[in-house]
Image (cartoon, rainbow, N blue to C red):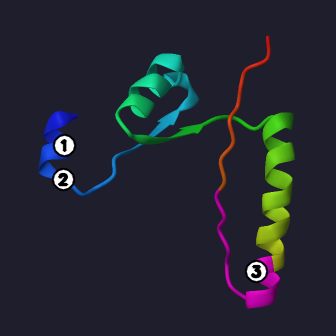
Amino acid sequence: MQRLKEAFPHTPLQLRADIGFAGPKLYEFCESRGIEFTIAAASNAVYKRHSDELLARAVELAKRTGRKVTLYDHFPQRAGS
């Protein structure tokens, strides 16, 4: 990490990973070093509830502008026990 930061001091580091690589140690590693991260996971009811409003906004914006729209959002997710 240090070599990357030295080589690209003004570039924010971002990690994209599949859920199979995710876990508390990865989250803590990234957060403690200021690394933004995105974890891809299969859809479920919780994700669908969070994404329905975002999808509705994207559809409405696309109708108004006549252009393709891509919106992103994030939310904390905790596994159920």
Q: Secondary structure at mark 3?
A: helix
CB under 8 Å between discs 3 and 1: no
Q: Residue at x 76, y 70 (%)?
A: 58
Q: Point out the stretch of residues depicted in magenta.
A: 61-72
Regarding mark 1 in the picture, which secondary structure is present there?
Answer: helix
Identity of the amino acid at label 3?
Ala
Q: CA distance from mark 3 to mark 1?
A: 38 Å
Image location of residue 32, percent across then percent down: 39, 29
For the C terminus, the image quarter is top right
Comparing 40 with 38, the one in front is 38
Which residue is tagged 3?
Answer: 62
Nearer to me, 67 or 38: 38
Residue 24, given in percent of the width and then of the height, sits at: 53, 18
Q: Amino acid at mark 1?
A: Leu
- Evaluate if marks 2 and 1 touch, with contact meaning CB atoms under 8 Å apart: yes
Q: Secondary structure at mark 2?
A: loop
| Magenta stretch holds residue 65 | yes
* In this view, 33 is above or below 63: above
The residue sitting at the top extreme is 81
Counting from the top left corner in percent of width and height, residue 35 is at 39, 40
Relative to residue 3, is residue 24 depicted above or below? above
**Residue on which disc 1 sits:** 4
The residue type indicated by label 2 comes to Phe
Residue 42 placement, left or right of 27: right
Sort mark 2 into few (<14), some (14-19) or many (20+) by Cα contacts within 10 Å: few
Q: Position of residue 64 (x, y in %)?
A: 80, 88
- Residue identified by numbered label 2: 8
